[in-house]
Image (tube, rainbow, N blue to C red):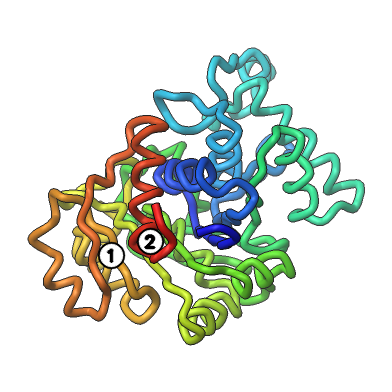
Amino acid sequence: MAGSKIVALAGGVGGAKLAEGLAARLGDRLSVIVNTGDDCERHGLLVMPDHDTVLYNLAGIEQAGLGWGIEGDTYAAMDQLAAYGEEAWFRLGDRDLALHVARTSRLREGGRLTEVCLGLQRALGVAAQILPMSDASVRTQVRTADGWMEFQEYFVHQRQVPDVLEVRFDGAALATLTAEVATALREASAIVLCPSNPLVSIGPILAVPGMRALLAAARARGVPVAAVSPIIGGRALKGPADRMLAALGHESSALGVARLYAGLVDRFVLDTVDAALAPDVAALGQGTVVTDTIMTDDASRARLAGELLAALGLGA
């Protein structure tokens, strides 16, 4: 595995956990391409939920019980904003708020999103690269019975209660891959699709023009591409992935996720709970790995990362 460079596609808590496990083994040989479709503007600041969740996990400062935000954070600024009559349903911790202030300030000074993000990562001592999927603005929107809405309105304000009838990625068609993302994929020894929502975490990344072509080119030159199922026993451990899959006409199972990734990956990791699905996944042309995929602490994250790397032929 010495010298091997690994690329992970990630979004959400599950993706951040596996990224942390990989980073513990790979350090600066890991590049994480993160979903920016969840990004939003709150109180005049750019908030990047998926990027920041990965950042805090790799920096070792995430809220242990939740997987996002900063451990021990306070909310004095949000409480004061609410006192002024500002919307406060999207809760930003005080230390978390500092990241959004610094990032937005540097962007307004003319900084490029990827370069700004890399600079902030270095300030927190993160060795791996966490790369926005594009420097362009892409916004995930979902349609419910009440019409189209931004993703955070659905995910946070409405607590993922309404059925999602349709998903779109506004701005994706005009987005471009950054040089950093393209280089990471071209130099990769292996590529991993983390256990993230395939529709609204991995989906926006794949929607950026050129992304699928680079993944196909990597596979054509023999680079293994693996996916880890975010669905265990028909349920998502975090978030609405299981309900979204069902509402949009997909099977809410590891097999349903494998079908979405057919032709994109050549290895698929299922939890032991879903071992019986392995033959059906294999019939899709995906080599199967069955293991315990639940990550409850640093040790289990590192264990799964090691098993995944071994399955990719890169040693444990």
Q: Nearer the viewer, residue 53 or 130?
A: 130
Residue 289 showing in the rendered view: yes
Q: How far from the left and from the top, in percent, is residue 32?
A: 57, 54
Q: On the image, numbered disc 2 is attached to which residue?
A: 198
Instruction: Report the amino acid beneath label 1.
Output: Val
Q: Position of residue 200 (x, y in %)?
A: 44, 58
When asked about the image quadrant of residue 263, the answer is: bottom left
**163 with respect to 271 (left or right):** right
Identify which residue is drawn at 73% across, 27% down.
98
Local secondary structure at mark 1: helix
As drawn, is 48 to the left or to the right of 316?
Answer: right
In depth, the one of 307 and 140 nearer the eye is 307
In this rendering, the answer to whether 97 lies above or below 211 is: above
Q: Could you classify mark 2 by the number of other residues whose Cα lies within 10 Å: few (under 14), some (14-19), or many (20 or more)?
A: many
> Residue sitting at 37 percent across and 53 percent down?
195
Residue 60, quarter of picture: top right
162 with respect to 142 (left or right):
left
Q: For residue 149, which numbered disc appears in the image?
A: none
What kind of residue is marked 2? Answer: Pro
Most distant residue in the left direction? 276
- Residue found 63% across the figure and 68% down from its top: 171
Q: CA distance from mark 2 to mark 1?
A: 7 Å
User: Which residue occupies the foreground of this view, 305 or 113?
Assistant: 305
